[in-house]
Image (spheres, helix red, strand yellow):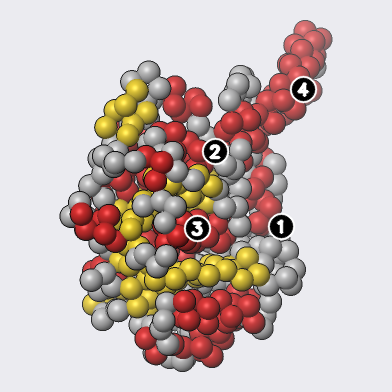
Amino acid sequence: MNRRIVITGLGILSPLGVSTDAFWENCLAGKTVVEPIPPHWRDYYDYSCPIWSPLPPIDYESFGLTRIDMMQLDKVQALGICAARQALEDAGLNPTLKDRRKNTYSIAISDSTRFGVHVGTGIGGIGTYTTCEGTHLLSGIARDLGELRTSLSEEGADASTAKLDRMLAAVRYSRRFNPFAVARCMPNACSAAIGIKFSAHGPNTTPCCACASGTVAVGRAFREIQSGTIDISLCGGSECIGDQYGGVFRGFDVAKTLLKENGDPSTANRPFDHDRTGFLLSEGGSGILVLEELEHARRRGARMYAEVRSFAETFDAFTVMGMDPEGTQIERLGRRLLTDASLTPADVDYINAHGTGTETNDNAESSVIERLFGAKPIIAATKSLSGHAIGASGAIEAIVTALSLYHQTTHACRNLDNPIRDLNFAREARPSTIRNALTHSFAFGGHNAGLVLSKAD
C-alpha cells in the first residue's frame, strides 16, 4: 500500500519549555538553558564538564497524572505521557476519562486496535535504577555508620564523629525501595505507559537505538501506517538521565564527549563551529508526534503540520562509540531517503542536522551534506539551543522540522561564529521558503536514521 501520512499533533517537554508554543518561541528567540550540574554530584566525582541543560519544574498534575501515577512511573515515562497528552490535544483528539480508578483515558477514534504507540528511549528508567540500587547498596552501610558514630560519640571521639558526619551526609539513598522498580526501569515502559494511559491497542514498540531512538520510533510509526496496519500513532522519544548520583553524566564525561566550559557557559555549546569542544548534555525531555493517515485526518478536519515522505536506516558497523569519519553510511542514508521520497538533492530546502558539537560528528555530517546537497539547503542545529536529549533528541528535531515547514520559518544556529564548512547554516531566525526538509540522527553503536518531511497540501 502507498498511503500518505501526515503529522497532526505535537507535544514537547524540554529545557526550552514544557509546551510546543513555549519551546518554539524560545527556539526562534535563540534562547538556551545552561546551568551548573547539581553540587552534590561532586561528592562522588570531580567532573571535567561542569554544566548541563536541566529540565524546568514540571506540574505533572496539570497533565492529569496523580500521586499514584507518579509512584508507579519513572520520570522518563511521566515525561512521555505528558508530551503524548499535549500531542493528542493539539491534534484535536482530546482524551476523555475512561476508568477513574486506573486514571486511564480514551480518544475519539472508531477502532482503538488501529491506534499504535512507538516511543524510543536511549536508556529508559535509569533514574529509578540508580535510586533503587543506591537504597539496596547503601541502607545497610548507613545504618552501620550511624551505629559507629553513636558509639564514638559516647567515647568522646569528636574528630572521628565529625568525619563520620561528613560521610553520612554523602550517603544519599531513598528510605523506601520502590515496589514498582522493575516496571519503572524497563525501557519498553515508555511506550507501554503511554499505550495504557490512552487505551491504544495497536502495535506498541520501544526502539532503543541510543541517540537515534526518537527518529527510529517516528519512522516505525510511519511504516505501520503506510502498510495499512494502523491509521494513527503516537510516536517519538523520551529520556531522563538526571539520576541522583550523577553517574550517567559521569559516563559521558569520562568518554570525553561533553563540552569544555570556556568561561561563559552560554557560549560553550557551538555545533559546527571551529571552536566546538563537545556536546551540552540535556537532562532529557520528550517529543511526541501524532502521525495519521491522510484521509483519516481529512475526514475529521485535522490540522496538518507536515507530510512524512520517507524514512530510512543504515548502520556504520564501525565502532560502538565512534562514527565512521568518512560518513559512508550517512550518505547512503541520505540517498535512500531521497529515492523513497521521489526527490532529488536539489529538492531539499532545509536540513535539521544531528549537530552534536563533537569533532568527528560535525566533520562527517557536514562533509556528507556538502557532497550530497551542496550549499543550497538551510541547515539548523537544534542542539545548539536545546542541548542533547539522547533518545528524545531525534523526535524533538522532527518536531522542529515540522514546525519549520508549517510556519515557513527557521531558527538560528547558536554560537556559530566560525563555521567549519561553507554551508548555508541558519545564522538568524527568519522566514524561509521550505517545501521539503530532511532530519537525521546518528547514535552510539552506529545507528543512523532519517526522515523526509514535506509541506502539507
Taking the spot 52% from the left edge, 35% from the top edge, the residue there is 74
Q: Are marks 4 and 3 in contact (CB under 8 Å)?
A: no
Mark 3 and mark 2: Cα distance apart in space = 17 Å
Amino acid under disc 1: Val
Quarter-wise, where is residue 66 in the image? top left
Which element carries disc 3, helix, strand or loop? helix
- Numbered circle sitting on residue 189: 2
Mark 4 and mark 3: Cα distance apart in space = 46 Å
Quadrant of the image containing the C terminus: bottom left
| Residue situated in front as seen by the camera: 114 or 350 | 114
Amino acid under disc 3: Arg
Crowding around mark 4 (Cα neighbors within 10 Å: few <14, some 14 to 19, many 20+) is some
Q: Which residue is mark 1?
A: 254
Of the residues tagged 3 and 2, which is closer to the observer? 3
Q: Position of residue 63 (x, y in %)?
A: 32, 35
Mark 3 and mark 1: Cα distance apart in space = 33 Å
Mark 2 and mark 4: Cα distance apart in space = 31 Å
- Numbered circle sitting on residue 334: none
Q: Are marks 3 and 2 in contact (CB under 8 Å)?
A: no
Which element carries disc 1, helix, strand or loop? helix
Q: Which residue is mark 4?
A: 141
Q: Earlier in the sequence, mark 4 or mark 3?
A: 4
Q: Which residue is mark 3?
A: 220
